[in-house]
Amino acid sequence: MQSVRFRLNGAETAVEADPDSSLLAVLRGQLGVSSPHFGCGANECGACNVIVGTHAVAACDTPLWSVADKDVTTVEGLGTVENPHPLQSAFIAEQALQCGYCVSGILMSAAALLMRNPSPSDVDVKAALDRNLCRCGSHNRMVRAVLRAASQMTAR
């Protein structure tokens, strides 16, 4: 076991774990973070996406050691019930939440996109969400929600 330090949703965090453990296992296990979901375990579905720095990554195949001294953001770090992130509000407004299993990973992919590109085009959003699977078929609503959030964020 080794101590690995990183910032989780803005808070300094240290965990004693095998540095080769997956970030997902540490987040859901030791740290009790429930938003990233285990989907495929092979970086194919996006259900476990989190933001590391400004990029969405699959936590299922991201080794813990690779996030040392970095910022890791999960849905819990986006917004709150009292003060939701514009993406969260837009997903509700566009009714882009169906079963919810994929949504946290999709929100992370979208938030990472908006961090790097505050005014994305429809094509940019589709490319950013391309690796996120949603079996409920809500993709069009999700794209509209991301574009809505981007518009609201740039209007501020």
Image (cartoon, grey):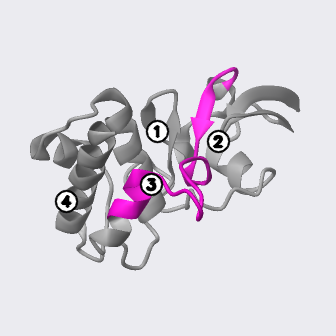
Q: Earlier in the sequence, mark 2 or mark 3?
A: 2
**Residue type, numbered disc 4:** Arg
Q: Nearer the viewer, residue 24 or 150?
A: 150
Residue 101 placement (x, y as % from top left): 46, 70
Residue placed furthest toward the top: 69
> Residue, x 60% and y 47% (percent of image)?
77
For label 4, the residue is 144
Mark 1 to mark 2: distance in Å?
A: 10 Å
Is the Cβ of the residue at disc 4 closer than 8 Å to that at disc 3? no
Q: Position of residue 18 (x, y in %)?
A: 79, 35
The label on residue 84 is none
Left or right: where 131 falls relative to 119 = right
Residue type (three-letter) at the residue carrying disc 1: Val
Label of residue 57 in the image: 1
Label located before the other in sequence (1 or 2) = 2
Left of 128 or right of it: where is 58?
right
Secondary structure found at label 4: helix
The amino acid type, in three-letter code, at marker 3 is Gly
Q: Nearer the viewer, residue 106 or 42?
A: 106
Q: Are marks 1 and 2 in contact (CB under 8 Å)?
A: yes
* Sequence-first disc among 4 and 2: 2
Asked if the residue under mark 2 is in contact with the one under mark 4, i.e. CB atoms within 8 Å, the reply is no
Relative to 120, 64 lies left or right: right
- Tell me the distance, in whole angstroms, between the alpha carbons under discs 4 and 2: 30 Å
Residue at the disc numbered 2: 23
Q: Examine the rendered structure and indicate whether residue 79 appears above or below residue 15.
A: below
The span picked out in magenta is 68-90
Position of residue 17 measured from the top left corner of the image (x, y, whole percent): 83, 37
Q: What quarter of the picture does the C terminus occupy?
A: top left
- Element type at marker 2? helix
Mark 4 packing: few (<14 Cα in 10 Å), some, or many (20+)? some
